[in-house]
Image (spheres, grey):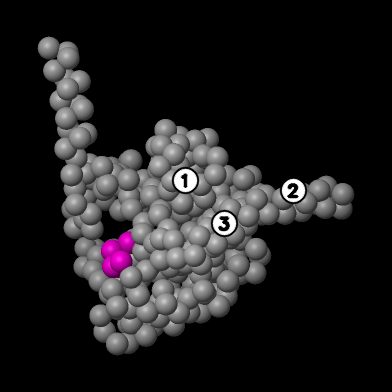
Amino acid sequence: MDINRNKWKKILQSYLDIAMSKLSKLLNLFRRGKKISCITAYDASMSKYLECLGIDIILVGDSLGQVIKGEKTTHGVTLDEMTYHTRCVKSGLKNSILMVDLPKNSYNTKSKAYKNSQKFISTKLADLIKIEIDTDNIDIAKYLIEKNIPLCAHIGLLPQTIKSRSGFRKYGKSKNEAKQLYDLAITLDNLGAKVILIECLENSLAKKISQNCSAPVIGIGSGSGIDGQVAVIYDLLGISFNKIDAFYINDRTLLDKQITKFRKKLK
């Protein structure tokens, strides 16, 4: 039994070493002032294409609930669905960092968070685990980091907890909220989060967090004064039909032309 346990530990450590090696390269780029790029993918063809274009981080996001399943929120995404799409994306990658969302209700206890993180890390499916964090569950983040799970801490707008459209707003406008978010980011940085992802923060607050964190700070809708940007591939392609205001210019001219060209050939 002890032999099997020791063998398992060695295998897990080797997988962690691979992930840490990739993250170390990313950190070196960050320290040299290179902006970090992160785009979502949900299949092998897209992940391979994005890697060929030099994208640093490929995110298998629970946004698949909206853009793949056609649901209104991310709330209905399951761990099995995230595992399936992560396997698809992984098969298209060689060098890019693969980050995966743990879906809603899959990390609401320490034991569940660790067990489900291990499903991705111990099988080499992912290099980074992303969870949404506020002051109520920072203990989960601390526990995962202590257990050597490479963690991306997502703060600000948290899609998994939003219950109405009023939750889709800029965060950190008030002094109290800005202080709370800043303190949270600094705490997560001090705990050892590998990456901090901020969503829909006031630009000045986002920049301040970026300037005072040792970990790379990447963002969605939080201005350009941070260390990198995150985008949903369907938003970039201009075929995202959700009603949330996009942070990117939707220009699908080329895609429209290609599909129109295809249809004309049929006539």
User: Residue 2 location, x and y as percent?
Assistant: 87, 53
Dominant SS in magenta? loop
The residue that mark 1 highlights is: 82
Closer to the N terminus: mark 1 or mark 2? Answer: 2
Residue 169 found in image quarter: bottom left
Q: How far apart are marks 1 and 3 (CA)?
A: 26 Å
User: Residue 221 location, x and y as percent?
Assistant: 28, 64
The residue that mark 3 highlights is: 25
Of the pair 242 and 24, the residue shown nearer to us: 24
State which region is magenta. 220-224
Q: Which is closer to the viewer, label 3 or label 2?
A: 3
**Is residue 195 rendered to the left or right of residue 7?**
left
Of the pair 197 and 140, the residue shown nearer to us: 197
Q: For mark 2, does the 10 Å Cα neighbourhood hold few (<14), some (14 to 19), or many (20 or more) residues?
A: some
Tell me which amino acid carries mark 2: Ile
The residue that mark 2 highlights is: 11
**Is residue 202 rendered to the left or right of residue 36?**
left
